[in-house]
């Protein structure tokens, strides 16, 4: 399996690598380095009364993601990143120091997307576009295996759905909706 994943990453480097993507991938990836763009979105939505459910849904999903991804799965799995197998590859970003599985950037992005979708926000569509580009950037930058990104999508979907349900329950309990 690892050879197939390396082959896909190598194919991306051979056939997709170009100056524009060398600029775009680190930029897009950097938007989510610590979930900043998604935290900012959740905070902005929380400040708008009519959007509060969406903001709380995203905030709950991102909190669940932080716990599941960074506190549980990454230390538990401890997967080595792909650039360790290709030391000659020039990384376009500083090499991450944590484990590879699942992709935290991808998980956070898709947690926000699925939280927004589950809560009924129309913002899930543009969020999905940014999430997809973020996931692809992690492959392009050679910092994640394809299965890390897939794991991030699946984890994000689960915690996004759970975050939206948790937000609905919290707001109903306080009679906010």
Image: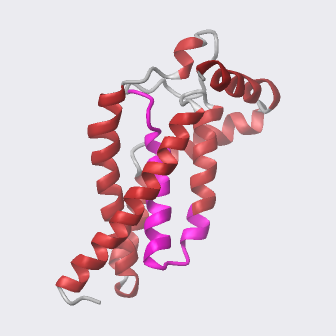
Q: What is the quadrant of residue 170 in the picture? A: bottom left
Q: Residue furthest left?
A: 174
Residue 77 or residue 138, whichever sits in front: 77
Q: What is the quadrant of residue 54 in the picture? A: bottom left
Vertical comparison of 164 with 19: above or below:
below
Q: What secondary structure prevails in the magenta region?
A: helix
Colour scheme? secondary structure
Q: Residue at x 57, y 12 (%)?
A: 85
Image location of residue 43, percent across then percent down: 35, 67
In this picture, residue 72 sits left or right of residue 81: left
Screen quadrant of the C terminus: bottom left
| Residue 69 shown in magenta | no
Q: Residue at x 54, y 28 (%)?
A: 143
Q: What is the quadrant of residue 124 in the picture? A: bottom right
Image location of residue 175, percent across then percent down: 20, 90
Q: Residue at x 62, y 52 (%)?
A: 132
Residue 122 in view (yes/no): yes
| Residue 116 shown in magenta | yes
Residue 37 in view (yes/no): no
Vertical comparison of 4 with 140: above or below:
above
Screen quadrant of the N terminus: top right
In this picture, residue 104 sits left or right of residue 5: left
The stretch in magenta equals 99-127
Q: Residue furthest right?
A: 15
Image location of residue 61, percent across then percent down: 35, 60
Q: Residue at x 25, y 78 (%)?
A: 169
Residue 51 or residue 118, whichever sits in front: 118
């Amino acid at each position: 399996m690892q050879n197939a994943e390396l082959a896909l990453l190598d194919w991306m480097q051979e056939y997709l690598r170009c100056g524009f993507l060398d600029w775009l991938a680190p930029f897009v990836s950097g938007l989510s380095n610590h979930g900043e763009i998604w935290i900012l979105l959740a905070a902005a939505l929380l400040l708008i009364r009519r959007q509060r459910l969406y903001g709380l849904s995203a905030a709950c999903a991102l909190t669940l993601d932080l716990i599941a991804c960074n506190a549980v799965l990454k230390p538990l799995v401890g997967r080595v990143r792909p650039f360790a197998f290709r030391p000659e590859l020039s990384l376009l970003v500083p090499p991450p120091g944590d484990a590879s599985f699942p992709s935290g950037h991808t998980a956070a992005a898709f947690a926000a997307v699925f939280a927004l979708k589950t809560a009924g926000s129309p913002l899930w569509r543009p969020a999905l576009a940014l999430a997809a580009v973020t996931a692809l950037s992690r492959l392009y930058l050679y910092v994640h295996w394809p299965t890390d990104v897939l794991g991030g999508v699946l984890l994000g979907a689960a915690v996004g759905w759970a975050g939206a349900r948790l937000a609905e329950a919290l707001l109903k309990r306080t009679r906010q909706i």
